[in-house]
Amino acid sequence: MAQPESWTGPDIVPATNWWIARGGRYLGAIQMRHSMNEILADFGGHIGYGVRPPERRQGIASTALQEMLTYATQPVGLGRVLIARNEMNVGSRKAIEVCGGLLASVRPADQSTATSAVRETRSATAPTSMSSVS
């Protein structure tokens, strides 16, 4: 299997992937992209995550997101990150807000360059622990 450093191409960015687990049970996953390309800036952002449906509404996404924001500071070195979410995803909105995220933009589905964007996408920026914004 190729190492991430050896993967190249305009659609590939360095990323860190973590599983979210408790007591050996898989709850979800979170990924932080260390840099952005055009598609990620338009549709995905720096951080993406998912929590298994039976585990939702327990603060798991908020906790994982806060940990990833800390990681974004050191060793990655980002001061702010972009997080995109589907407009219908209220749980994700709450997780982003709990972690200090503020609405940065709203993009109607028909203005996306990503072919899978069929709903409005809301993007937020969130400070990392490196940011001087509280």
Image (cartoon, rainbow, N blue to C red):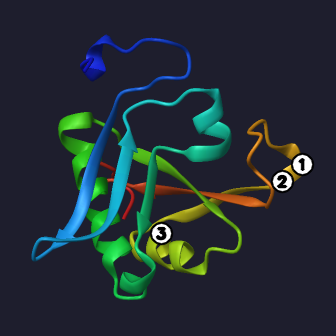
Report the residue marked by disc 1: 110
Indicate the quadrant containing the C terminus: top left, top right, bottom left or bottom right. Answer: bottom left
Q: Indicate which disc residue 125 carries.
A: none
Kindly identify the residue that appears in the image at 47 percent across and 23 percent down: 12
Report the residue marked by disc 3: 96
Amino acid carrying mark 3 in the image:
Ile
Is there CB contact under 8 Å for labels 1 and 2?
yes
Kindly identify the residue that appears in the image at 83 percent across and 53 percent down: 109
Q: Residue furthest right?
A: 110
Q: Earlier in the sequence, mark 3 or mark 2?
A: 3
Q: Position of residue 112 (x, y in %)?
A: 80, 43
- Relative to 64, 94 lies left or right: right
Q: Disc 1 versus disc 2: distance between alpha carbons?
A: 4 Å
Q: Indicate which disc residue 109 carries.
A: 2
Label 2 environment density (alpha carbons within 10 Å; few <14, some 14–19, many ≥20): some
Secondary structure under tag 2 reads helix
Tag count in the figure? 3
Which numbered mark, 3 or 2, is in the foreground of this view?
2
Q: Residue furthest left?
A: 23
Q: Is residue 129 visible?
A: no
Q: Disc 3 versus disc 1: distance between alpha carbons?
A: 24 Å
